[in-house]
Image (spheres, grey):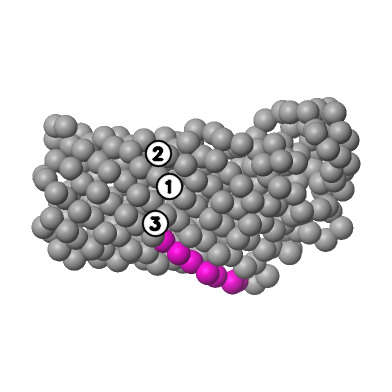
Amino acid sequence: MKHKYDMRIILQAICFCFSISALCFAQTVDIDAWIWNVSSSGDIELTGDLGDQLDIGEELSIGEEWTPGATLIFGEGPLQIGASVFQLDLGGTEQVEQTFSFGGLDFNASADATTSLEMLVARGFLRFQLGEEAVSFALEGGGTYVDLDAKASAFDVFSTGADSQVALPYLGAEIRFEPISSVSLQASLRYSNWEYSDIETTWSEMELTAQWKPAPPFTVGGGYRRLAIMLDAPEEEISGDLVFDGPAIYVGLEW
């Protein structure tokens, strides 16, 4: 797993360099934290001779979960720099409704199975903003790191699973509307289709938010987030077509 920790060290170093350089020049710092009520759907497949394709909501019994995240943006005017991170930790222990195989293990009906799906998503980006009046538009580009880990175990004795890590560039766009100075509406979309070595990944993220500034520098709001990932990693013997979505609550500071 040395590769996994190397990727995290590289990501942290990049974010640190971004932060130091941005702090030297930034006139504005914007911090947003959120709690996301995530619902999951899709399939995970352990490839090779390990197992079958499974529905994460049915066979793996992975449902809704509240998960935290944060975004940090430096800069005012046309050029901004930032970073964002969140980690999903979905799963639980339930009785198997129908027999299935996963990672070379058979999970019989009526047995207690513990399942988990963990995913770390971190990104660093540059944003170029046009317009500072009631309506503004921004183009965004950067890199995303995804660390996906799926596991299943029975009777707390037998366990199986697989994980994969991938780093990929992406492009995005955001439109922002401020009908009054204390209220803003935002819609953003980010997308990447990337193939490196034997790993092929398609990643898309949509975010809709409404925010209110009750008293500077505080902001509060709500919205909807959707993340879709299609991953094919033969070397790690895992592939998946996953969708995570749900409402989110936001709090922030801007100064």
User: Is residue 11 shown left or right of residue 250?
Assistant: right
N-terminal label among 1 and 2: 1
Residue at 65% over, 46% down: 149
Residue that mark 1 sits on? 225
Compared with 250, 17 (above or below) is below
Residue at 40% over, 45% down: 224
- Number of numbered tags placed on the structure image: 3
Label 1 close to label 3 by CB (< 8 Å): no
Task: Examine the image and state in which quarter residue 143 appears.
Answer: bottom left
Residue at 82% over, 48% down: 103
Frontmost of labels 2 and 3 is 2
Label 1 close to label 2 by CB (< 8 Å): yes
Compared with 91, 75 (above or below) is below
N-terminal label among 2 and 3: 3
Residue that mark 2 sits on? 248
Compared with 222, 55 (above or below) is below
N-terminal label among 1 and 3: 3
